[in-house]
Image (cartoon, coloured by chain):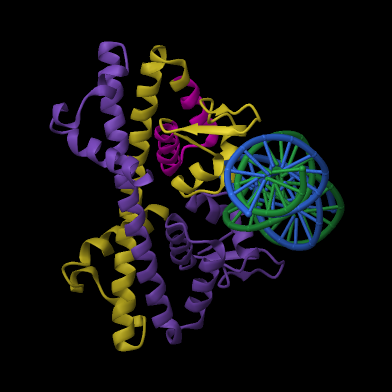
Chain colours: A purple, B yellow, C blue, D green
Amino acid sequence: MLYTVGEMAKKLNVAPSTLRYYDKEGLLPFIERSDGGMRMFKDEDLELLLIIDCLKKTGMSIKDIKTFMDWAQQGDDTINLRLQMFQEQRKLVEAQISQLQDTLDILKYKCWYYETAKAVGTTSIPRAMKTEDLPEDVRPYKEKYDKMRKHAK
Amino acid sequence: MLYTVGEMAKKLNVAPSTLRYYDKEGLLPFIERSDGGMRMFKDEDLELLLIIDCLKKTGMSIKDIKTFMDWAQQGDDTINLRLQMFQEQRKLVEAQISQLQDTLDILKYKCWYYETAKAVGTTSIPRAMKTEDLPEDVRPYKEKYDKMRKHAK
DNA sequence: ATACAAGTTAAAGTTAGCTTTAAGTCAATA
DNA sequence: TATTGACTTAAAGCTAACTTTAACTTGTAT
């Protein structure tokens, strides 16, 4: 089964111009062309397009994704390079998650802060509250918040 | 205690030009100026700058952060608006984390895939392996990967 | 055979979030 | 008081990742 750029774009939920852009940047060394010059995507190409999508979600640049696609094209000689790239990217994503979790805790504190402010009509009440007087469940968030401020001092 | 733009920038580990840019964009309605026109950051301003940093880490745009800073400047009348903004942002960050966790699982599968390929010298072995023949701990990652591919069909 | 939607390219445009530049001012130290 | 490093502004420049435009071609449906 073969697909045009528009059909494949629909499958991936991206604009056709995006796939053309990726191709221009060398991310799609595997696509073939019809006699008339039109891109012909194969079923198996979907696999690699999904890997591109996955790497993009990790924040990898187009340029680095191209490097990977070139390696994949070269075959088994580049297995170790590809392994290293995935291991590195995995570490990066783990760090991103950890960073977001910290941020989330600050947001949780701020939600409590404004909920309390809303209940009493002023931010001065939650602002003045000491860590030991906070509800048990928000205390760790407040501690993280304090840590962040202390760090910037 | 008062700080110049350079001193405050150092505390926050950003370039002075970044703070000037934020000021120009209206993110810092609280900073005062010396007679000579120089920005004078107060100790309490650090708090708000850290909030800007936090909101940035959630992916919030400069424009939306400005909206929040304006609300904060207006005082207690905007408590509910600010609460809603933090609640929404919290949901967004939770979704981001969940998305990254899915991506991480794919990466974990790929790490196993290339480790196995490395051991045997070819990707054809891990590629051909059926889900039920995988090590128990990678099976869920493979299942997620299959799901993703099925979804794009 | 013809119409026409969807494909092709190169090149220009867009957006966000800064950074750099240029020309000039402020303020702390010798 | 003179120097000097850090400040000020407006405006231009930068980068990534696309998107849009314009002029043209392909391939399918009638």
Question: Would you place residue B65 above or below residue B149 in this image?
Answer: above
Q: Is residue B59 above or below residue A66?
A: above
Residue D16 located left or right of residue A121 = right
Foreground of the two, B147 or A58 = A58
Q: Position of residue A1 (x, y in %)?
A: 50, 64
Q: Is residue A24 magenta?
A: no
Whether residue B127 is visible, yes or no, is no
Residue C12, percent across and down?
A: 80, 49
A65 left or right, relative to B44: right
- The percent position of residue A101, horizontal first and vertical second, equals 29, 46
Which quadrant is home to the C terminus of chain A?
top left
Tell me if residue B136 can be seen: yes
Q: Is residue B6 left or right of residue A79?
A: right
Q: Quadrant of residue B111?
A: bottom left
Direction from residue C13 to residue B124 in the image, left or right: left
Q: How many marks?
A: 0
Q: Main secondary structure of the magenta part?
A: helix
Q: Residue at x 55, y 69 (%)?
A: A66
Point out residue D11 in the picture as x, y percentages from the top left corner. 79, 40
Q: Residue B46, located in which quarter of the rendered image?
A: top left
Question: Magenta segment range?
Answer: B45-71
Q: Nearer the viewer, residue A83 or A6?
A: A83
Q: Quadrant of residue D20?
A: top right
* Residue nearest the observer in this picture, B31 or B122: B31
The residue at 32%/14% (across/down) is A122
Q: Looking at the image, which residue is at 44% across and 41% down?
A: B53
Q: Residue at x 52, y 50 (%)?
A: A10
